[in-house]
Amino acid sequence: MNAMMRYSLTAAGLFALLALTVGAAYVPMGPMNTPVALTIAAAKGVLILGIFMHGRGASPVLKVFITLGFFWLALMAGLTMADYLTRGG
Amino acid sequence: MALGVHAADQNQPVRMSGFLAATAVLGGAFLAIKGYEYHHEISKGLLPGASFHLEESSAPAAQMFFYLYFVMTGIHALHLTIGIGLVGVFLARTVFSRSPRRLALAVNQLGLYWHFVDLVWVFLFPLFYLAGRSS
């Protein structure tokens, strides 16, 4: 598969997931709406990281460091959200 | 941008410049839409501060939402502006570069920056634009 094809398919996949997440936002799922949206966002993130940022095919050491970096970022965002979501008033 | 990086790796500077220019144009279009949105929201009095006003829901919570909204999207827009500027710099570098290998390496880094800013938007969009749509 040539590069044009691979990147076009990835972009098409990203737009399909975008349509899915917009559609899912209008389905009443109570507290599940945000987790569903974030799961779809994570799937899009994997596409961007794996294909556009060349994570796929990277050396194992590089993969460990990519994972580490984003895990750290998720930790920071998670702790911030834990603060916002548990404050009363 | 991904196609631009690929063209740089294949040592095709003309194709690379084309894809980089297209990237900058698309980034500019995003900023233009964002600017239009900001203008619309500010004219409706949604910018947090003394003149903030919104009748329908509880004002402090709404002000908190718009505070977060403007800060997060504003910082994202700032990074996108930096990205577009860098793409411009790299377009100029293509003309003067004598080492295609070094340029390709640099364009790869630019691609990582660009896609990271993109990745941030992937998460900001559902959190700010889609949260609470179904209720």
Image: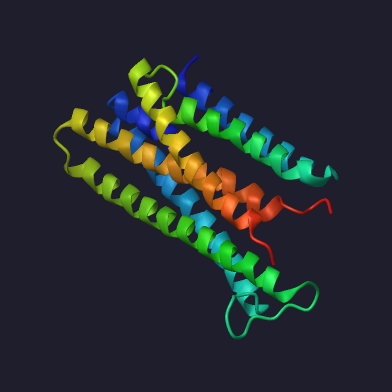
In screen coordinates, is B107 left or right of B133?
left
In screen coordinates, is B103 left or right of B28?
left
Residue B4 visible to an observer of this rendering: yes
Q: Quadrant of the N terminus of chain B?
A: top left
- At a point 83% along the width and 42% down the height, the residue shown is A29
Where residue A8 sits, quadrant-wise, is top right
Q: Quadrant of the C terminus of chain B?
A: bottom right
Please tell me which residue lies in front, B54 or B88.
B54
Residue at the outermost top position: A1
Where in the figure is residue B13, as x and y percent of width and height? 28, 33
- At a point 57% along the width and 32% down the height, the residue shown is A11
Where in the figure is residue A37, as x and y percent of width and height? 69, 41
Residue at the outermost bottom position: B50
> In the displayed structure, would residue B95 be above or below residue B32?
above
> In the displayed structure, would residue B6 be above or below residue A23?
above
- At a point 61% along the width and 34% down the height, the residue shown is A14
Where residue A47 sits, quadrant-wise, is top right
